[in-house]
Image (cartoon, helix red, strand yellow):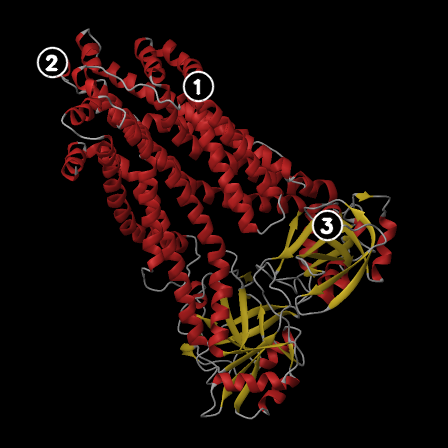
């Protein structure tokens, strides 16, 4: 049987190749994702191991919980703690360091990081703690001096002696470049910018007088880091987190590489899974067709003594060989996919530090196992059908397989899958479990919905092909008529082929509709609630505006009111985390309209100063709170407050969580500041006068980005669109794989209809008409897949948005993008038909008529 399997594959090289491509691409995406993830982790591990090489013990403020934004500044330590640590027996030296955020201003232009990475400022450390490597100049040692990382210097043509500005909470500080360095011997830290200044300057400029962000310690000779850590723990307060240098390097790697991989790896694996799922449809369809075409072959095997088990093993053996070969090639292609991803990151400016390519066992085992198992499982049903070929079929030409005894149950099974899938989707977004559990339920539900739709679509092929093929029949007459009839000849085959494309188009439409709904939700909330002319935010990811920026904006004669809004992530009781929004009760109502509930009004806001809070509707439901109740919150650094519910409002988009006054928010924030500043012009001031005036008033804060409300809305829309385009690129892989499915089906169909095509040629059908017939058949199949995908994507998006309606998410269909998806499906059909149509038109008439 092994020889038979290999001969069968060798006799159908094109079929085997086209079938393999789907698995190759899916496995390549999966293994490439693991390669990139390991490269990022290993690179940051090496960087931070080098950075902490001279540090035996590392002290930072202990966090009660890890904020969802990745941690950020963990809160300062008192500088007096440095002397206490130095006094611990076994300590050779202890130094404080300031770690904060601040960007450079070069020739009046703000230097922003890339890809949302931070603009980091460190205070310089002495040896042995300072493991940065100078490439020119020296490290700062006097007031107003700065050293910058190599990539930052190269990108902006900075040189020793050049005078720059450093954006700080204290304003724009003039600094002079005295050195260029590699951070821990690495030229860059992803898209981040890195600068170092003196400890005194950092304390003065970043509101750290008498404090330090962290303390680094070196041990005396003969004292181990573990022993020194134990001694220091006994000498410092409980709020101080004490780590060995090795533990600190591991934590820094987890925080940095983990924050990148926590989004990147699951996202890429999800798209790889979609690609493999599409590939399963192609494999199933290919083996179903080939089993039908090789019925006489299997019947002959049965007549010479082959058992049903041997026939089944022959078909599964072919699938196993295809799966193994394709998966191995996919593993090798994964390295190329990883390099492609790295190149794309570099092209958008997000050049992540990468270690050399290493192949971990997981990188081989998981993709190989998925590729092989999906291939074999997809071929299982066709293999079972092959065992039902009766030996008598060897004597009859044109014999067909009898229908399976399970065929009559297909409609019920399809309905069960659809209902079960929809229930899983609803349960996924409505449950209160972990995010990973919700995503698993959503993914499982989506798979069941796609499978149920694919099974049910066989009953829709004839009416859909009739409607979609009618214009082609009117336009191309004979080729159009034949194409429509060919598409309906085998509804199951057409449905399976269309379903592969349905998955890709369905995912694209779902993402488009959901993203458009999210965009409309945010913009709608702005229009409904914000009554400001200007919106001022920080240019830097994770950075806040100084609290006194409000006074600077209000000082402009063109401004009638400026109101700052802060935010702090807090732990609620013993449960999860949420957001405490800090406001100025005296000014906010002039630029923001609350949607009060349960009798609330703006009159409640002045009472916020006495540990009061007004809570958002969803927050109140989640924690079973009503006006008059109290709840306890804890900041990341351990500060505890009991707040009293004064009223309730509705705005889960802009003011999710609850609202307190600015002073209360500052007590809960790790690093107090303003997330956003809302400004309204004075009466009679026009935008052409008002915006420049406010920009001048904010000149001391170059990090501040002054935008009109319309411009801010556009920037939000652009950010969502950028993410959307990235998702489209990744989803395109599923569409590409489905193209190979159409090619494979049409190629096998042409092979199956060789004599039929010969008859058409014999009665006068031209080569051009044969090509058009195959092309139109492909287009009809592709459009069916596109229509089903669009309907499914819109329905799934509607269900999800209805489930999130309480969160303010609205349902909004971007019809332009939906139409483009349908056009893409039609073009996919044209492209996929190129090779089969050419092969069909080149068939020789006599050869075709003699074919058996």
Residue at 76% x, 55% y is 659
Q: Nearer the viewer, mark 3 or mark 1?
A: 1
Residue 619 numbered mark, or none: 3
Q: Quadrant of the N terminus?
A: top left
Does the rendering let one see residue 51?
Answer: yes
Residue 846 numbered mark, or none: 2
Q: Which badge, 1 or 2, comes first in the chain's sequence?
A: 1
Residue at 44% x, 68% y is 153
The image quadrant that residue 40 belongs to is bottom left
Q: Position of residue 470 (x, y in %)?
A: 41, 12
Residue annotated with mark 1: 459
633 relative to 198 in the view: left or right: right
Q: CA distance from mark 1 to mark 2?
A: 37 Å
Q: Position of residue 42 (x, y in %)?
A: 39, 65
Residue at 55% x, 38% y is 424
Q: Which badge, 3 or 2, comes first in the chain's sequence?
A: 3
Per the image, label 1 sits on a secondary structure element best described as helix
Q: CA distance from mark 3 to mark 2?
A: 77 Å
Of the pair 491 and 209, the residue shown nearer to us: 491
Residue at 43% x, 63% y is 155
């Amino acid at each position: 049987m092994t020889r038979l399997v290999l001969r069968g594959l060798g006799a159908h090289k094109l079929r085997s190749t086209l079938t393999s491509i789907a698995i190759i691409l899916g496995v390549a995406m999966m293994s490439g994702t693991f390669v990139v993830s390991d490269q990022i982790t290993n690179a940051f591990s090496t960087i931070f191991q080098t950075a902490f090489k001279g540090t035996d013990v590392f002290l930072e403020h202990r966090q009660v919980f890890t904020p969802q934004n990745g941690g950020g500044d963990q809160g300062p330590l008192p500088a007096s703690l440095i002397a206490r640590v130095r006094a611990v027996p076994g300590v050779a030296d202890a130094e404080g360091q300031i770690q904060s955020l601040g960007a450079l201003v070069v020739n009046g232009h703000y230097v922003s990081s890339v890809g949302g990475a931070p603009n980091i400022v460190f205070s310089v450390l002495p040896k042995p703690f300072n493991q940065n490597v100078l490439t020119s100049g020296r490290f700062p040692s006097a007031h107003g001096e700065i050293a910058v990382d190599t990539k930052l210097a190269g990108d902006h043509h900075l040189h020793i002696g050049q005078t720059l500005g450093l954006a700080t909470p204290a304003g724009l500080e003039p600094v002079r470049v005295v050195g260029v360095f590699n951070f821990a011997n690495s030229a860059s830290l992803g898209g981040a910018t890195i600068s170092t200044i003196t400890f005194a300057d950092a304390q003065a400029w970043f509101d750290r007088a008498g404090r330090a962000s962290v303390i680094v310690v070196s041990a005396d000779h003969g004292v181990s880091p573990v022993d020194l850590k134990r001694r220091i723990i006994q000498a410092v307060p409980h709020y101080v987190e004490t780590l060995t240098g090795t533990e600190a390097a591991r934590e820094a790697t987890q925080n940095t590489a983990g924050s990148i991989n926590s989004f990147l790896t699951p996202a890429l694996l999800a798209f790889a899974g979609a690609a493999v799922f599409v590939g399963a449809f192609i494999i199933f369809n290919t083996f179903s067709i080939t089993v039908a075409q090789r019925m006489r072959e299997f019947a002959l095997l049965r007549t010479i003594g082959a058992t049903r088990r041997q026939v089944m093993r022959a078909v599964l053996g072919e699938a196993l060989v295809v799966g193994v070969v394709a998966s191995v090639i996919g593993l090798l292609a994964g390295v190329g996919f990883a390099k492609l991803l790295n190149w794309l990151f570099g092209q958008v400016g997000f050049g992540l530090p990468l270690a050399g390519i290493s192949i971990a066992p997981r990188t081989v085992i998981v993709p190989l196992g998925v590729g092989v198992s999906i291939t074999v499982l997809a071929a299982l049903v066709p293999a079972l059908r092959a065992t039902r070929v009766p030996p008598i079929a060897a004597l009859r030409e044109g014999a067909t397989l009898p229908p399976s005894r399970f065929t009559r149950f297909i409609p019920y099974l399809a309905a069960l899958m659809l209902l079960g899938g929809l229930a899983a989707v609803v349960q996924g977004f409505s449950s209160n479990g972990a995010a990973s559990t919700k995503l698993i339920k959503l993914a499982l539900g989506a798979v069941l919905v796609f499978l149920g739709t694919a099974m049910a679509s066989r009953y829709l092929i004839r009416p859909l092909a009739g409607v979609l093929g009618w214009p082609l029949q009117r336009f191309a007459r004979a080729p159009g008529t034949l194409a429509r009839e060919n598409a309906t000849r085998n509804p199951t085959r057409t449905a399976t082929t269309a379903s592969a494309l349905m998955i890709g188009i369905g995912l694209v439409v779902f993402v488009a509709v959901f993203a458009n709904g999210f965009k409309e939700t945010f913009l709608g909330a702005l229009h409904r609630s914000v009554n400001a002319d200007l919106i001022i935010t920080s240019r830097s990811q994770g950075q806040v505006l100084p609290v006194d920026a409000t006074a600077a904006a209000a000082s402009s004669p063109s401004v009638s009111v400026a109101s700052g809004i802060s935010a702090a992530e807090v732990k609620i009781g013993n449960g999860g985390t949420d957001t405490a929004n800090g406001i100025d009760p005296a000014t906010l109502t002039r630029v923001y309209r609350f949607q009060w509930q349960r009798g609330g009004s703006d009159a409640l806001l002045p009472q916020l100063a006495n540990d009061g809070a007004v809570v958002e509707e969803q927050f109140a439901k989640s924690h079973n709170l009503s006006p008059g109740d109290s709840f306890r919150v804890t900041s990341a650094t351990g500060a505890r407050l009991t707040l009293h519910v004064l009223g309730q409002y509705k705005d889960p988009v802009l003011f999710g969580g609850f609202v307190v006054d600015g002073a209360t928010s500052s007590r809960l924030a790790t690093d107090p500041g303003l997330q956003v500043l809302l400004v309204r012009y004075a009466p009679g001031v026009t935008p052409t006068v008002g915006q420049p005036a406010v920009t001048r008033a904010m000149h001391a804060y170059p990090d501040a980005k002054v935008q009109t409300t319309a411009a801010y809305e556009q920037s939000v829309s652009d950010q969502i669109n950028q993410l959307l385009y990235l998702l489209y690129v990744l989803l395109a892989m599923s569409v590409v794989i489905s193209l190979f499915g159409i090619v494979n089906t049409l190629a096998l169909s042409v092979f199956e209809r060789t004599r039929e095509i010969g008859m058409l040629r014999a009665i006068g059908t031209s080569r051009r008409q044969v090509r058009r017939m195959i092309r139109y058949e492909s287009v009809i199949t592709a459009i069916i897949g596109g229509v089903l995908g669009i309907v499914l994507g819109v329905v799934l998006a509607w269900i999800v948005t209805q489930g999130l309606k309480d969160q303010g998410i609205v349902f909004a269909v971007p019809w332009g993008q939906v139409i483009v998806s349908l056009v893409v499906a039609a073009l996919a059909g044209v492209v996929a038909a190129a090779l089969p149509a050419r092969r069909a038109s080149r068939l020789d008439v006599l050869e075709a008529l003699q074919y058996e």
